[in-house]
């Protein structure tokens, strides 16, 4: 994602991301998930034209539409992504702030859920050496830092 909000860069990013996501989504639907990837589940594809060799796809919950199960479903996205990365021997992984955009998950609540799930999943020894959290804006980062639940130590 571009670090500044230049409209041209954003439009290029949206177009590239959309075409990659569309292509990978079609491949996933044809093979493993004809009805779509269920909320909280994960799937692995190649990185396509991205610099990453692989992409772990996950569908976060739409806030307010899962009968109070949003937190467990969001945590599942992070836990299952970590587990799949460890299973495949990946050394690095990057996460967006899952569900906090158009899916409407409040950033403060998402930070608490995501950090707790990540801490739990990363407590299991494995191949991962570098896990990055990538935020769309400085406000998203600030909300995460303020509400995260990682324990110092």
Image: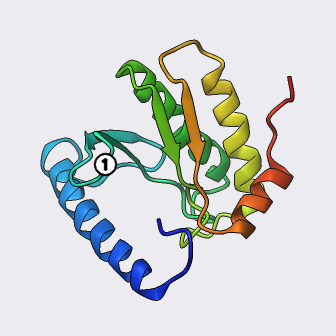
Q: Residue furthest left?
A: 30
Q: Residue furthest bottom?
A: 7
Q: Is residue 48 left or right of residue 113?
A: left
Q: Is residue 127 left or right of residue 71?
A: left
Frontmost residue, 72 versus 118: 118
Residue 117's quadrant in the figure? Answer: top right
Q: Residue 106: in sight, yes or no?
A: no
> Which image quarter holds the C terminus?
top right
Frontmost residue, 63 versus 49: 49
Q: Tell me, what colour scheme is on the image?
A: rainbow
Q: Is residue 141 left or right of residue 50?
A: right
Q: Residue at x 41, y 79 (%)?
A: 9
- Quick one: SS at disc 1? loop
Q: Is residue 67 left or right of residue 27?
A: right
Q: Looking at the picture, how far across and down is residue 23, in whole percent?
A: 18, 60
How crowded is the residue under tag 1: few (<14 C-alpha within 10 Å), some, or many (20+)?
few
Residue 96's quadrant in the figure? Answer: bottom right
Note whether 49 is above or below 87 in the view shown: below
Frontmost residue, 23 versus 47: 47
Q: Looking at the picture, how far across and down is residue 145, in whole percent?
A: 80, 51
Note whether 62 is above or below 41 in the view shown: below
Circle 1 residue: 51
Q: Looking at the picture, how far across and down is residue 34, in whole percent?
A: 19, 51
Q: Residue at x 74, y 69 (%)?
A: 139
Q: Looking at the picture, how far across and down is residue 87, in whole percent?
A: 39, 19
Q: Residue at x 72, y 59 (%)?
A: 141
């Amino acid at each position: 994602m571009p670090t500044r909000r230049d409209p041209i860069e954003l439009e290029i990013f949206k177009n590239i991301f959309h075409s990659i996501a569309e292509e990978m989504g079609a491949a996933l639907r044809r093979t493993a998930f004809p009805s779509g990837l269920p909320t909280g589940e994960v799937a692995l594809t190649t990185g396509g034209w991205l610099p990453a060799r692989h992409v772990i796809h996950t569908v976060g919950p739409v806030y307010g539409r899962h009968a109070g199960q949003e937190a467990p479903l969001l945590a599942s996205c992070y836990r299952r992504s970590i587990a799949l990365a460890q299973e495949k021997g990946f050394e690095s992984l990057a996460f967006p702030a899952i569900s906090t955009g158009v899916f409407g998950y409040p950033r403060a609540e998402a930070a608490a859920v995501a950090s707790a799930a990540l801490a739990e999943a990363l407590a299991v020894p494995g191949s991962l050496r570098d896990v990055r959290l990538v935020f769309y804006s400085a406000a998203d980062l600030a909300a995460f830092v303020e509400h995260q639940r990682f324990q110092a130590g």
